[in-house]
Amino acid sequence: MGRFWERFRGRNRKAVIAGAVAGCVCILAGGYAGVGYYYSGRFYIGTFINGVSCSNKTAEEAERGLMNNLLNYKLTIRGRGGIEGQITGNQLALSYIDMSQAEEVLWDQKPWAWIFAMMGDRNYHIAFPVDYNEGILDSLLEGMPFMDGKLVTPPADAAIEETDSGFVIRPEEQGNMVRFERLKEAAAAAIRHGETVLDLDKEGLYEAPSVLGSDEQLQSEVRQLNELTRARITYDFTDRQKVVNRGIIRQMLSKDLYGNYFLDKDKAAEWVKQMAYDTDTFGLPRDFTAHDGSTIRLEGGDYGWCIDREKTTEELISAVSAGMNGSLQPSYVYTAMDRSADDIGGTYVEVCISQQRMWFYKDGVELVDTPVVTGDPNKGNATPAGGVWAIDAKINGQILRGQDYAQPVAYWLPFNGNVGIHDASHFRSYFGGNIYLTNGSHGCINTPTDQAEIIFRNVDKGYPVVVYE
């Protein structure tokens, strides 16, 4: 009997334990199934959609939460220089059109696998179709601080500029001008996708320079320019200068079909033409300060400077090509005695027809002031006046011949064909007054011999003779 009860008690204990275990399993299974059933219509715990917690919510509850969150939506638009602006969902009257994708997330859950969902969060980013007022969006974007015209700087291309040491590339400038049409597209896309930050730089929404400092063509041009413009040439005109420097030479350059620079002869000739225009005096009108300080307008004559443009152009091109650094003189067709703007200078003869008087100045000092007899206008022999002529020759001892005369003179200084200055005391006793109107010369300036000699001894071929009424 004792053994029997012992065996009975052992078997009963095992049954009790087995029953207890089975009961626990049933309870757990029922509880697990109950939780699984719960999550058949609700989002797992730790579920986030577009950053909004949907844990334990039905699809409808989640949609309400998402809609409320949408009204709190804020898009920050960042520009250069720390400038930024913001747009909110409220401003746009933002709303979802279709939220069915949220339900799809719920239906894709496996309710009986809820236990595994406890192990971590699930984040879903869904681009729900949204509706908003596009006109308001455009207005808000136009009012952004980075669209303020007072603050906007357009981009600038890299360019070549001249410095004291040569040509260099001025770097491009990015500026901060926004490409507005592209901004509208990018902002709309950001709103549709629920993005909270739009970086104008990262999205390439700024106008950009089209030529960069690293551009190979630009770099090549700088090298060529510095090589071709290394010369510095000075034309010295006594009281003024014409300097051919880097900037001037650059204006003389052109590009060939391959984009390479070369010294353009036509452009160099144009520069020489302008230099001649500025400095030539031959045969041009000029103002002359007479012995008494009055100003006389002179219109004609053959005295003055005249640059040989073609030859000077060739010489300039050669000098520039060789990289010359120094002074260069133009080549001339006609020359005068003084290269300053007042090319008559300080040594000249002055004749006044109406006063029948002549003066001679050497280096600004008066050496002669004498009465003379000029050509007889009543016989068609008036002395040419109103201009400046250069002395054509200096002859000691000459016979002046005409149709009805042959007159020997000691000092002969012709300046206008057969018209000149000469001594006349050996055939005239009186000078000045109105003699020239009744007994004038054939056009020459008859001068007392001693005064003619002074002039003759102190001038040479090329010196100016000013004659005016």
Image (cartoon, helix red, strand yellow):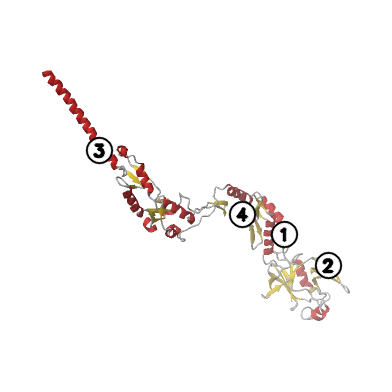
Q: Which residue is mark 1?
A: 309
Marks 4 and 1, how far apart at CA: 21 Å
Q: Which label's residue is closer to the chain start, 1 or 3?
A: 3
Q: Which residue is mark 4?
A: 246
Marks 3 and 2, how far apart at CA: 149 Å
Q: Secondary structure at mark 1?
A: helix
Marks 1 and 2, how far apart at CA: 39 Å
Name which quarter of the figure residue 137 lies in: bottom left
Q: Residues within 10 Å of mark 2 (few under 14, many from 20)?
A: few
Does residue 167 appear left or right of residue 386 in this picture? left
Quarter placement of the N terminus: top left
Q: Which residue is mark 2?
A: 397
Residue type beneath disc 3? Gly
Does residue 53 appear left or right of residue 440 in this picture? left
Q: Position of residue 227 (x, y in %)?
A: 62, 49
Q: Position of residue 460 (x, y in %)?
A: 76, 65
Which mark is drawn over residue 31? 3
Label 1–label 3 contact, CB within 8 A:
no
Q: Which label's residue is closer to the chain start, 4 or 3?
A: 3
Q: Which label's residue is closer to the chain start, 3 or 2?
A: 3
Marks 2 and 4, how far apart at CA: 55 Å
Residue type beneath disc 2? Gly
Q: Position of residue 200 (x, y in %)?
A: 45, 52
Q: Residues within 10 Å of mark 4 (few under 14, many from 20)?
A: many
Front label number (2 vs 4): 4
Quarter placement of the C terminus: bottom right
Label 3–label 2 contact, CB within 8 A:
no
